[in-house]
Amino acid sequence: MKYAWIERNRQHWPVSLACEVLGVSPSGYYEHKARSAKPRRNVSDDALLVHIRAVHAESRGEYGWPRVWKELLARGIRVGKERVRKLMSLHGIKARGKRKFKATTDSNHKLPVAENLLDRQFSPPAPDSVWTSDITYVATDEGWLCLAVVIDLYSRQVVGWSMKPHMKRELVIDALRMAWFRRRPEPGVIFHSDRGSQYCSDDFQRALIAYGMRSSMSRKGNCWDNAPTESLWGSLKVGRLHGRRFETRRAAMDEIVNWLTFYNHRRLHSSLGYVSPMQFERAWLAAQQRQAA
């Protein structure tokens, strides 16, 4: 049976990939897993609520009912998704509310702009083939804290970041440098960003050339051309920073690093079949090693 094969091989193949190959849905697999779990004592609403609150607290309020349900199944707690949804609704447990945030792109310059090589192809075949990057900012009592990240588009893992009190080109250069030293990719990586002056600067473009990377930029005023990175900002700000007050930039930096660690190692990513970026990439590496053996 297809679901049984996925279960036997889930340590070697991402659930989302196996489901795609076998023509079944990830949600169907998880529902089958919940139904076929070993019989165990029924979990009372009070006990289930404790588990729900624990998962919700561990995500710092970021998870809504779909991710809470997936995490409960991953922990071996046999429960239906409707029961989780209704119980969370009854007790007012929900993901942090959505909020719009201002764009930070400064594209009002006369610097050269790269061609859009990515062209919204957001599913590269392997890690370190496409990286994306963007800048945002966070308010503190000491002033703005600016954050730049570099994302490996294959696994959505944040592979580099930089935080400074300004939005100058050094911010993105440091994020790029961190990503390169951590990953050491082969030449040819597409590096996609918006048309901000930091990314168009001579210093940043020279750094890309030195690392053997190809610059790619979104069309003017089109945030959808860099949608995965925009999604990351939504997850960070809505899930962790919204409503928070930081007395110092250091306090904000500590919270952001804590969230980036959670995001890479533990946060269930819907586009990856509800596994974390690092779990998804480990599964890919294991598959490559088996093929090479």
Image (cartoon, rainbow, N blue to C red):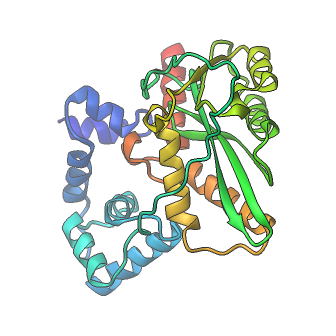
Residue drawn at x 26%, y 61% is 38
Residue drawn at x 71%, y 72% is 246
Front residue (pair 222, 153):
222
Name the spot of residue 159 as percent of width and height, x first: 66, 38
Front residue (pair 23, 85):
85
Residue drawn at x 80%, y 65% is 250
**Residue 227 visible in this rendered orientation of the protein:** yes
Name the spot of residue 71 as percent of width and height, x first: 39, 60
Q: Is residue 48 left or right of residue 63?
A: left
Say which quarter of the image contains residue 86: bottom left
Q: Is residue 4 left or right of residue 254?
A: left
Front residue (pair 95, 279):
95
**Residue 293 visible in this rendered orientation of the protein:** no
Residue drawn at x 69%, y 44% is 148
Q: Is residue 200 left or right of residue 71?
A: right
* Total number of numbered discs in the rendering: 0
Above/below status of 147 relative to 111: below
Name the spot of residue 123 as percent of width and height, x first: 42, 27
Q: Point out the image quarter for the N terminus.
A: top left
